[in-house]
Structure formats: structure tokens, C-alpha cells
Amino acid sequence: MTQLTFRALADPTRRDILQMLTTRDMTIAEVSDQFDITRPAVKKHLTILAEGNLIQVRTQGRERLNSFNPTGMAPVLDWLSFFDSFWDDRLGALKTLIEKEIQ
Amino acid sequence: MTQLTFRALADPTRRDILQMLTTRDMTIAEVSDQFDITRPAVKKHLTILAEGNLIQVRTQGRERLNSFNPTGMAPVLDWLSFFDSFWDDRLGALKTLIEKEIQ
DNA sequence: TTGTTATGATACCTTTTGGTATCACGTCAA
DNA sequence: TTGACGTGATACCAAAAGGTATCATAACAA
């Protein structure tokens, strides 16, 4: 669902969390340490990110490791591609071409 | 402000309005005709889109024409470019290269 | 001038959102 | 086994979001 992805990206804290998770997988506690909000608040953000398919969670003992899921960004990229011709024709055309070539 | 752009894109109605405005400039009344919500509701959406710098408004007599502003999407593209290496290295590199060439 | 039309602005309501405090539960180590 | 630790879940709160109804204002036309 495209809406769940955009919703997940609408909050600045969640966007920051997402960028953090690109450096390494983290537990909730580790993520919480980086922000001035409580762990339950971070948990809520992670839940919304998971609903938007932007992170994946795997259990390891009593820890739960959260990792960035690049695939989840696809709906946003797709939606944005609608506007390709507006910001630059050449770039848009090339992007389409390369994306086709990849498959 | 990046946040104002993401906030503007978070609502599905606003995203639809934006796509509509790529076909032609429209007044509030014209936009309202396309949705099942009242004109004041549409006005609110247009205000938020304007705050996100995604549309521009010009007065023409007693009408106010709303037009899509492609430049406003830049903060989102910039933020997304952070993840370029994740979804495809070749595409990301090429994009950066072309963007530089354009300037 | 007067009525219609296009729009802006305000007040108000309900739901969602972002946050805290708190408790319950499973897991690891001594 | 017992205590500490990491996490999930729930209840609750204030603010923001999305919506409607309604009124005010400016411009066009007869």
C-alpha cells in the first residue's frame, strides 16, 4: 500500500531512524539511545515503519534486530516517477531505460 | 523545509490533487469537483501543498489558479538520494552524474 | 446597483498521531 | 531458581489532521 509508505515517511524521527538503520541493524534500545523520546515512542515509530514495509525485524535471543528494507521504498519511487518529465526529461528517460534493462 | 514537503505528500487526496495539476492549472472549484469532499476541505489541502512549496497560486480576476511546482519536489528527491546505493548502484551513480552535468 | 459567483476565513467536531507512564512476559546469567 | 535485562502491550493524554457548516468579501454581469 503506497499510503502506508508515505505515512511512514511523514515523520522526521522515522526518517532519521531509517537513515540510522542503513549503517547497521539495531535493537529498539539502541535506536532509543539516539533520541530524546521514550522507548515505547520509538517502538511505535518502528511499528509504523514495519507497516510501511520499510524495515524488517528478526528475533535473536531476547533481542529484536531492526533492519532497513530498501524494497519498501519502491512505492514512493514509483509514485515519483510520474513526475519524471517535470524535473528533467533526460534523467527521467534514462531512469526508465535502466530500470527496464535491470529486469 | 523538508518536513513541510513530506507532510504535504502524506495525504492521498493531496497526492491526487498534485497529479491532476500536472495536466492543467485549476481553480479550487475545479479541483473540488473531482473529489467527494467540500471546498473548504480542498482549500486546506491546497494550503498545505502551498506550504510544502509543491504548488503556486496566481490570481486572475476573481479566480485563483493553482499550478504544480516541480521544484518543490527537490527536498524529497534529495532525501531519497541518500538511499541510492541501496536500490541500485548503477542507477544511483548515473543519476548523480547526470544531475551534476545539468548544472 | 444588485444579484450571482469564486473564494477566503472561522468555528467546531471527530479521529489520528506522537508522546508518556506503567505493567507483563520471555530470556539470559549467576 | 532467582534476579536483571530486553521487549511487547496497554491505558491514557495533548495536539494535529481531516472534515463540515457557515459567514464574509471581492469581482463580474445584467
Image (tube, coloured by chain):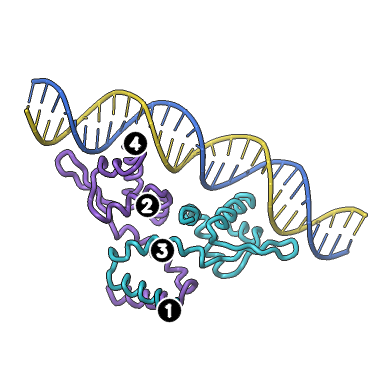
Chain colours: A cyan, B purple, C blue, D yellow
* Residue C28 location, quadrant: bottom right
Q: Amino acid at mark 2?
A: Arg
Instruction: Answer left or right for A28 relative to B33.
Output: right
Give the number of the disc on residue B90: 1
Mark 4–mark 2 Cα distance, whole angstroms, equals 17 Å
Between A98 and B103, the one lying in front of the other is A98
Quarter containing the C terminus of chain A: bottom left
- When the figure is inspected, residue B89 is found, relative to residue C22, above or below; the finding is below
| Mark 2 → mark 3, Cα distance in angstroms | 13 Å
Tell me which label, 1 or 2, sits earlier in the chain.
2
Name the N-terminal-most of marks 1 and 4.
4
Would you say the residues marked 1 and 4 are in contact, meaning their CB atoms lie under 8 Å apart?
A: no
Same subunit, labels 1 and 2: the answer reads yes
Q: Earlier in the sequence, mark 4 or mark 2?
A: 2
Tag shown at residue A65: none
Badge 3 and badge 1 in a common chain: no
Q: Tell me residue D20's x, y (percent).
A: 38, 31
The kind of residue tagged 3 is Asp
Where is residue B52? Give x, y as percent: 35, 52
According to the picture, the residue beneath numbered tag 4 turns out to be B38
Q: Residue at x 51, y 60 (%)?
A: A16
The residue pinned by badge 3 equals: A78
Check disc 2 and report the residue beneath it.
B15
